[in-house]
Image: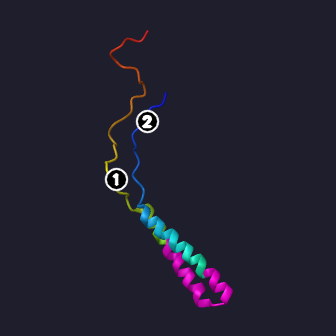
């Protein structure tokens, strides 16, 4: 028997911000590889900057509260005893 408890934590960030951070991280990896292949220090520094931006986006995605169609229920507690109170227990 399983009783679903209401969600009590806060909702975590917005997915599109996290996705943008992932795209930036992939771009930084490409810049780093291309900079190493061409021995171009400017591309390597660009990779470092884009990596920092990706890190900030990931951090922002966790710190921003997520949007929800329904509020989080913090006041209701689930009943640990699923037996109805009307019926006597034998």
Characterize the local packing of mark 1: few (<14), some (14-19) or many (20 or more) Cα atoms within 10 angstroms: few
Residue designated by label 2: 4
Vertically, is 79 above or below 57?
above
SS class, disc 1: loop
> Considering only vertical position in the picture, is 88 above or below 15?
above
Q: Residues within 10 Å of mark 2 (few under 14, many from 20)?
A: few
In depth, the one of 26 and 72 nearer the eye is: 26
Along the viewing direction, whichever of 68 and 56 lies nearer the viewer: 68
Is 81 rendered above or below residue 46?
Answer: above
> Residue 53 lies in magenta, yes or no?
yes
Q: x and y percent of residue 7 in the render?
A: 40, 43
Highlighted range, magenta: 32-55
Mark 1 — residue? 68
Q: Quadrant of residue 74?
A: top left
The percent position of residue 14, horizontal first and vertical second, equals 41, 61
The reply to whether the C-beta atoms of the residues labelled 2 and 1 are less than 8 Å apart is no
Residue at horizontal 42%, vertical 60%? 13
Main secondary structure of the magenta stretch: helix
Q: Earlier in the sequence, mark 2 or mark 1?
A: 2
């Amino acid at each position: 028997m399983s009783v679903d408890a209401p969600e009590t934590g806060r909702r975590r960030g917005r997915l599109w911000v996290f996705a943008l951070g992932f795209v930036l991280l992939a771009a930084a990896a490409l810049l780093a590889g291309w900079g190493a292949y061409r021995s171009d220090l400017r591309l390597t520094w660009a990779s470092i900057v884009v990596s920092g931006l990706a890190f900030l986006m990931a951090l922002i995605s966790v710190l921003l509260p997520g949007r929800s169609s329904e509020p989080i229920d913090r006041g209701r507690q689930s009943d640990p005893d699923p037996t109805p109170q009307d019926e006597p227990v034998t």
